[in-house]
Image: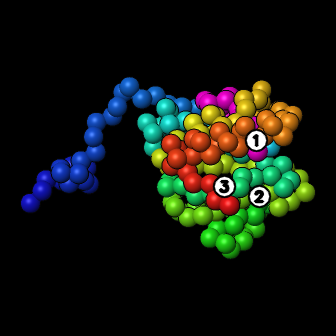
Amino acid sequence: MTEKIHGSDAAGAIPPDDLARTLSVVDDEHPAGGWVSLVGDTYSMLLTGEQTNGAYCLIDMRVPPGGGPPPHRHDFEELFIIVSGQVEFTFRGDVTVVGAGSSVNIPANAPHRFRNAGDSPARMLCMCSPAGQEEYFTRVGDAVDGPTAPPPDLSPADQAVRQQRALDLAAQYRTEMLS
């Protein structure tokens, strides 16, 4: 019989506390990973994989009316918590509109997209597990000065450069862009 240690089997005992890891306290005015403008949205990289030992990242997303990414899929879980506004999620071709107070889980590998379906900006928290999506966004998007800073005024050529960068880096970040 296996010995019990505080409710766990000895074979599955909880490892000791990792004292090298510290408490992380952030908000959208002081995100760990800064702010990024991407496809017209502004993302605050609240918690990065560096703080969570790669377990997850947490992103505060501000999405203008009509904003959101193109259809895509990736091999990690994604949880959205709608803070304000109305967001339309297309999941495997089915459309669902949700509002503030709703939570939406996108399973790994499923084709999806989201779009602000309202007339005012939407805000949501997005947790990706494991982490890495925050790095992708940082490498693809443009750094901005704060959560409500306007996106850069990009020419069509600049937009094309960012779209190509997103495609070039997608596989490295376990993402596939869909048409």
Q: Do the residues labelled 3 and 2 touch (CB within 8 Å)?
A: no
Residue topped by disc 1 = 160
Element at label 2: strand
| CA separation in Å, label 3 and label 1 | 30 Å
Outermost residue, right side: 119
> From the viewer's perspective, is the residue at label 1 or at label 2 nearer?
1
Looking at the image, do the residues carrying marks 3 and 1 touch, with CB atoms under 8 Å apart?
no
Q: In which quarter of the image is the C terminus?
A: bottom right
Which residue position is annotated with label 3? Answer: 81
Estimate how packed mark 2 is, as few (under 14), some (14 to 19) or many (20 or more) residues with alpha carbons within 10 Å: many
Which secondary structure class fits the magenta region best? Answer: loop
Considering only vertical position in the picture, is 24 above or below 110?
above
* Amino acid at pointer 3: Ile
Rendered residue at 71%/43% (across/down): 163
* Residue on which disc 2 sits: 115
Nearer to us in this view, 80 or 5: 80
Identity of the residue drawn at 59% across and 42% down: 168
Magenta-colored span? 27-39
Q: Which residue is drawn at 49% across and 32% down?
A: 50
- Choose top left, top right, bottom left or bottom right for residue 160: top right
Q: Which amino acid does label 2 sit on?
A: Arg
Percent x, y of residue 54: 45, 39
| Sequence order check, earlier mark of 3 and 2 | 3
